Amino acid sequence: MRQKRIGFRFTIAGAVVAATTWALPTLAALQPGATAPDFTAPTSLAGKPFSFSLKSALMNGSVVVYFYPSAFTGGCNVQAHAFAVNKEKFSAVGASIIGVSLDSIERLNEFSADPAYCGGKIPVASDSDGRIAKSYDLKVTGMQRGLKDSRGAEIDHGFAERTTFIVGKDGRIFAAVGGMGSEENVDQTLLAVKRLTWRN
C-alpha cells in the first residue's frame, strides 16, 4: 500500500513522544494502559501454518502486534522485511513479533516464507474478517475491486490501518505506533520495546 509520511503518533503511558517530527493524535486505536484484546488466529511462519495465541506468547515476554494492510504490497513488504532483519534486536530485549492482516492464510504461507519479506523469521496471522483489528479499535475498510499486489495478483480482501502495538507481559498496551512510513514504524517500535524493558 502507498505510504504517507505525515509525521507520526507514538504514545507511551499516555504521553506523546516526538523526537524529530511532529505528533499526530492517536486516532481510534486502543491507548496505552488499555488491556490488549486476547486473540487466537491461523498463522504462518516460514510457510507452515499454526495457531497463534497472544495469551500464550505473553508468557514468554512482551509481544509486538503489528497490523498492516496487505501482504505483497509496497509498504507492507518493506515493513515485514524490516521486522525480519531486526528480529534478533527485538528478541534481545525479550519481545516477540506477530504481524496481522486480512490476508488469507494461503497468501500468508507464501509471504511468511519469502526471503524478500518475512524470510521465515516473522509469523503473520490471518484476520480474514477483520475482527481482531476491530477489537483494537482500528479502522477496517472493505475490499476494493481491481487492486493488485506487487506480484500482479488481485487483492481479494479488505484492509486494516497500519498500527503497531507493544503489549507488555501484564497484557496491557505499553505503546501504539502509527501514522508513519514502514521502516520508521519498525524503528520507533524497537525504541518503545527498549523503553518497556528499561521500565521493568
Image (cartoon, rainbow, N blue to C red):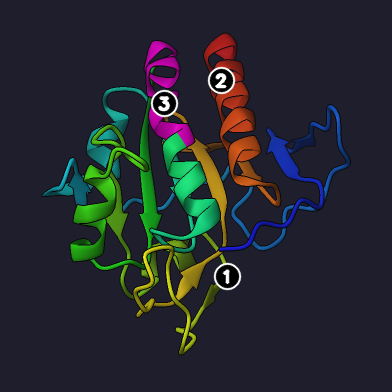
**Residue 63 seen in render:** no
Looking at the image, residue 6 sits to the left or right of residue 83; the answer is right
Q: Distance between the residues labelled 2 and 1?
A: 26 Å
Position of the N terminus, as image quadrant, is: bottom right
Q: Main secondary structure of the magenta part?
A: helix
Type of amino acid under label 3? Val
What distance separates the C-alpha of mark 2 from that of mark 3? Answer: 21 Å
The residue wearing badge 1 is: 139
Q: Which of 6 and 148 is in front in this view?
A: 148
Q: Which of 33 and 146 is in front in this view?
A: 146
N-terminal of the two: label 2 or label 1? 1
Q: In the image, what residue type sits under mark 1?
A: Lys
Mark 1 crowd level (few <14, some 14–19, many ≥20, 10 Å Cα): some
User: Which residue carries the number 2 mark?
Assistant: 196
- Front disc: 2 or 1: 1
Q: Is mark 2 on a helix, strand or loop?
A: helix
Residue type at mark 2 is Leu
Numbered tag placed on residue 74 in the rendering:
none
